[in-house]
Amino acid sequence: MTRVRVTAPATAARPVTESREAAQESDVGQVFVRSLIRSQLRLALVVAGGFLVILSAFPLLLAVVPGLADTTIAGIPFDWILLGVGIYPVIGLSAWLYTRTAARNEARYRDLAGDP
Amino acid sequence: MNPGVAAAAVAVVSVATAVIGFYGLRISRTTGDFFVASRTVRPWWNASAIGGEYLSAASFLGVAGLLLLSGTDALWFPVGYTAGYLMLLLFVAAPLRRSGAYTIPDFTEARLDSRAVRKVTSLVVVLVGWLYIVPQLHGAALTIRITTGLPSWVGSVAVVVVVCLTVVAGGMRSITFVQAFQYWLKLTALAVPILFIIFMLAGTGTPPLATPSENPTGLAPAGWYNNVSLLVALLFGTLGLPHVLVRFYTNPDGQSARRTTLIVLGLLSVFYLFPTAYGLVGRMFAPDLARSGQPDAMVLLLPRELIGGPAGDLLSALVVAGAFAAFLSTTSGLVVSLAGVISQDVLGAGVGGFRLAAVVSAVVPLGFALMTGSLALAGSVGLVFAFTASTVCPVLLLGIWWRGLTDAGAIAGMVTGGVLCGGAMIAGALAGAASTPAWLAQPAAWSVPTAFAVMVLVSRATAGRVPKTLVRVMTRLHTPERPLATGR
């Protein structure tokens, strides 16, 4: 069995990425990179913020509307349904929307910056 | 419950885990395989494995136990665990994969070009890992004691032995198979008994003994500070868990890392429906389990309590098997990631160093677990999340998204967060659960922002220390690796 020594990659640039990064370190390249980073960060913050707003709306709704928490559906009280089941589709939707839009941002970057 | 049946269930799960682990040995050969499964694991496998590792004793036993005690207040736990994963997807998944590092200290060293940061990060990661392993061993001790009547230490030792064998034999690759298998085992082990119980209850039309809003022990509700602080801990803490982050490196590229995380979210959501069901059923039909003094054992005891006879014994055995799978999988995942960190920084890289590090990673928390009594599982895991949220999370988030982070800032922030949160935890442990004020019991709401603030301020103050490699590193973290037309 060959013994392989693992070392932490210090600047682990492989040949392919080396040329890609050289091209992108030009001023023009950096403008595109920074704009991509900004759009991805904005997207993440918007999705996270929107999700947190909905997350806080659920208990607020239960606290504010009298009797809502105790209404039962099929024997299960509504507050258990909302907080125990209803949140998960919201999480899934946020995640799916984010993944799609992030991929679109990256596709747009590739169109603008070109492919070496 | 029948001790023989329970012991058999534990034995079967342990043997199956070890066997699948050894099978992985035939495939993994190189150190690369040992560390990160050669980056060839497909999304569904990887997602199942992440789900398997992530769903620990707290998720399997602790959540239902807390739901029994505290009702809807405790629903923030499963929601927080899952939403924390969403935060991971949004802020960390793709850039971390692209960084190319094997472990978190690798990432911080590469990003900040500093060995000092690497050492501090390694120390924090090892602490977090050990803190997380201890509740798993406590959970195993509780399970063995309640179901077989054997002394508690048997459970903790059994978990450590099986984990060491599996990890030493095959490293990450075998662990992936094992973890994936254990997610599906846990899901089945939890789902089948409760579905059976619900079916039976609905069929016989048994009236509930209490309404879900009734508090079985008369404990006061937790209050809004506790819920908010807990949510902060869970949302920010998932970002920093070492055994979770290591799995990102096993994806082929950034977009597949995102897709894997998406699948994980689905798997987690489906899973958490079941402890919620246990909690609800327990509250309505078996509230006296809350007064037994061991609410965490509720999931283990409920089938026997409500069904009884040999069917109840078998269903309970299934749950015990699932619980043990939870302890084994989370502990293995943590041991693998800790072994990676320890072997690279302390013991010298290579397969032999990894194996020794794995044994060390498992034995130290075992000593600690044997010496301490068990606290409420979900609560103690919540504190670990708070610690991670105050230390690893800020350096990851700021490192990925902010160009201004310096090595001095990173170290200052991690140390501040660690000291504040760790200090609060120790103070709380010394004062005892009853006399700890709310802000000390769950410190995330103030320790996390403080850590972030210190990191930013010190980085600003040492702005000259921004690494020379900044532009290259940021470019690599954020730009896509290959044409997206292939759709992988």
Image (cartoon, grey):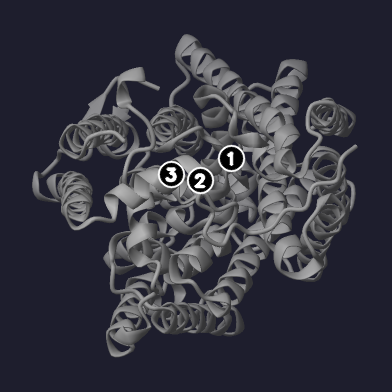
Residue at (48, 38) in percent of width and height:
B279
Q: How many marks?
A: 3
| Spatial separation of the CA atoms under disc 1 and disc 3 | 43 Å
In the image: residue B300, left or right of residue B260: right
Identify the subunit bearing mark 3. A
Give the percent coordinates (x, y) of residue B132.
62, 59
Give the percent coordinates (x, y) of residue B72.
35, 46
| Spatial separation of the CA atoms under disc 2 and disc 1 | 7 Å
Residue at (50, 32) in percent of width and height:
B252
Task: Name the residue at the top extreme.
Answer: B203
Task: Give the numbered dot on residue B60.
Answer: 1
Q: Amino acid at mark 1?
A: Phe
In the image: residue B140, left or right of residue B4: left
Please tell me in which quadrant of the rendered image residue B306 appears.
top right
Contact? badges 2 and 3 (CB < 8 Å):
no
Task: Name the residue at the left extreme.
Answer: A65
**In front of the other: label 1 or label 3?**
3
Judge by depth and name the residue closer to the eye, B310 or B449: B449
Secondary element at image label 2: helix
Q: Looking at the image, is B216 positioned above or below residue B121? A: above
Residue B64 can be seen in this image = no
Identify the subunit bearing mark 2. B
Q: Which residue is mark 3?
A: A17
Are the residues flagged by discs 2 and 3 from a single subunit?
A: no
Secondary element at image label 3: helix
| Spatial separation of the CA atoms under disc 2 and disc 3 | 45 Å
Contact? badges 2 and 1 (CB < 8 Å):
yes
Q: Amino acid at mark 3?
A: Thr
Please tell me in which quadrant of the rendered image residue B228 appears.
bottom left
Q: Amino acid at mark 2?
A: Val
Q: Which residue is mark 2?
A: B63
